[in-house]
């Protein structure tokens, strides 16, 4: 059995009561004081996440912008320096290789943040499509630790540790060479919880000191460390997709309802563009919807969805929402059953529970407007 990887913060988990599990080949904390408590902490105060398992790739060189434009579905040419873009990498068939964040520092200097579970696959995909572009691609994941401070009190906490005014870093913007508690960091403002917050990228050897400083400075605001359990419920309530759930190589961004991040009218070609244009023209045959269970229970990932005994789709994510106190979920279903108000059954263990299609925007995001 392959030995699990450790982030630079592995040594501090137990100190804060962390319960460690395997995730994406890493030892990571699933919870500290309990995921319901941690979920509420982020929604109401602030929470600190270790996301050092995420992957980071630099693309540097004369053709960096052209290459990234070819690689992803969103329009990279709209980015100014120090701006961030959410986008997808797709296969030629339109299925999703991964979703990622693209940071542009200059026309010849890009930084890509990819999912931990796809790190090796993504890096190979990026390298395999380098072609004749005049660029250098580097996987720098091992040289970077990443902390995420999320919640309504995040800015007040981080502000105590930096000399610059954090109001200068707007939503989906980034700033390099920010001194955080004496350490040089890249700081951005994106987030994966539906709350305002910051990502702090630092050297691995600086991570523990920054983690402790942020929690110490956050004590008066009720800040606490947060594990993977609450990370998933938070992103789910905010309708933020997770690779392997809402998307994979057989699901396209259009089927997910994320067409906003697919710019089919851009002049430049990108991988998967033809397939996505074809799908858009012909119309999708299935779609991601929100649902609420009408019967008591919880519909988990992978559960079958039925209409009059026929399988019409499956649950991608399902929870009893800690914020809404309802049993809700996201599901990929045949297009004829996607209208709000449509009822269907979900096979939960040996029972069929009634559910109804609802708006999938479960939670109003509190992120800063761009």
Image (cartoon, helix red, strand yellow):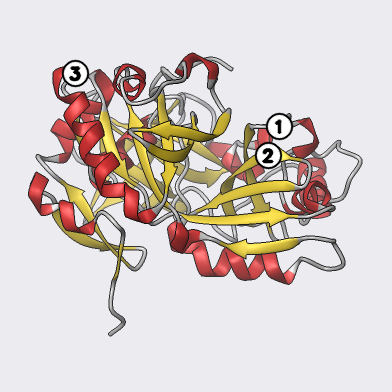
Residue 201, disc: none
**Between discs 2 and 3, the one toward the N terminus:** 2
Give neighbour class at mark 1: few <14, some 14-19, many 20+ (Cα, 10 Å): some
Q: Element at badge 3?
A: helix
Q: CA gap, disc 1 to disc 3?
A: 33 Å
Q: Earlier in the sequence, mark 1 or mark 3?
A: 1
Residue named by callout 3 = 221
Q: Do the residues labelled 1 and 3 touch (CB within 8 Å)?
A: no
266 and 170: which is toward the camera: 170
Q: Is residue 364 visible?
A: yes
In the picture of the structure, the residue carrying the numbered disc 2 is 104
Q: Kindly indicate whether the residue at mark 2 contacts the one at mark 1 (C-beta within 8 angstroms).
A: yes
In the figure, is residue 137 to the left or right of 195? Answer: right
Which secondary structure lies at badge 1? Answer: loop
Residues packed near mark 2 inside 10 Å, few (<14), some (14 to 19) or many (20 plus): many
**Counting residues from the N terminus, which is met first, the one under dot 1 or under dot 2?**
1
Residue 230 image point, x, y percent: 25, 39
* Residue where numbered disc 1 is placed: 81
Residue 215 lies in what quarter of the image? top left
Is any atom of residue 326 visible in this view?
no
216 and 267: which is toward the camera: 216
Q: Which residue appears farthest toward the bottom when viewing the image?
A: 1
Q: State whether residue 40 is above or below residue 53.
A: above
Quadrant of the rendering where the C terminus is positioned:
top right
Q: Residue at x 51, y 45 (%)?
A: 333
């Amino acid at each position: 059995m392959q030995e699990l990887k450790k982030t630079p913060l592995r040594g501090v988990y137990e100190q804060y009561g962390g319960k460690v599990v395997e995730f994406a080949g890493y030892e990571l904390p699933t919870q500290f004081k309990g995921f319901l408590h941690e979920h509420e902490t982020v929604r109401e105060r602030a929470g600190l996440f270790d996301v050092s398992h995420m992957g980071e790739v630099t693309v540097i060189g004369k053709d960096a912008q052209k290459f990234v434009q070819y690689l992803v579905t969103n329009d990279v040419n709209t980015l100014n320096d120090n701006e961030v873009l959410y986008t997808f990498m797709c296969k030629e068939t339109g299925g999703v290789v991964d979703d990622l964040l693209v940071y542009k520092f200059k026309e010849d200097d890009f930084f890509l943040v990819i999912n931990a579970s796809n790190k090796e696959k993504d890096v190979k995909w990026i390298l395999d499509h380098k072609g004749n572009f005049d660029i250098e691609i580097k996987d720098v994941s091992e040289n970077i630790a990443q902390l995420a401070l999320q919640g309504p009190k995040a800015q007040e906490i981080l502000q105590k540790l930096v000399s610059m005014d954090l109001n200068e870093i707007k939503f989906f913007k980034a700033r390099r060479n920010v001194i955080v508690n004496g350490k040089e960091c890249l700081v951005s403002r994106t987030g994966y919880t539906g709350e305002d917050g910051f990502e702090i990228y630092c050297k691995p050897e600086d991570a523990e000191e920054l983690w402790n400083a942020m929690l110490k400075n956050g004590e008066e605001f009720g800040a606490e460390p947060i594990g993977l359990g609450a990370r998933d419920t938070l992103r789910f309530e905010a309708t933020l997709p997770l690779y392997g759930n809402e998307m994979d190589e057989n699901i396209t961004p259009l089927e997910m309802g994320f067409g906003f991040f697919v710019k089919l009218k851009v002049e430049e070609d990108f991988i998967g563009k033809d397939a996505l244009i074809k799908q858009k023209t012909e119309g999708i045959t299935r779609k991601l919807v929100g649902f609420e269970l009408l019967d008591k229970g919880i519909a988990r990932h992978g559960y079958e969805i039925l209409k009059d005994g026929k399988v019409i789709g499956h649950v991608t994510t399902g929870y009893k929402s800690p914020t809404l106190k309802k049993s809700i979920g996201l599901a990929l279903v045949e297009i004829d059953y996607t209208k709000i108000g449509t009822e269907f059954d979900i096979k939960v263990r040996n029972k069929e529970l009634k559910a109804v299609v609802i708006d999938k925007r479960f939670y109003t995001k509190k992120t800063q407007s761009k």
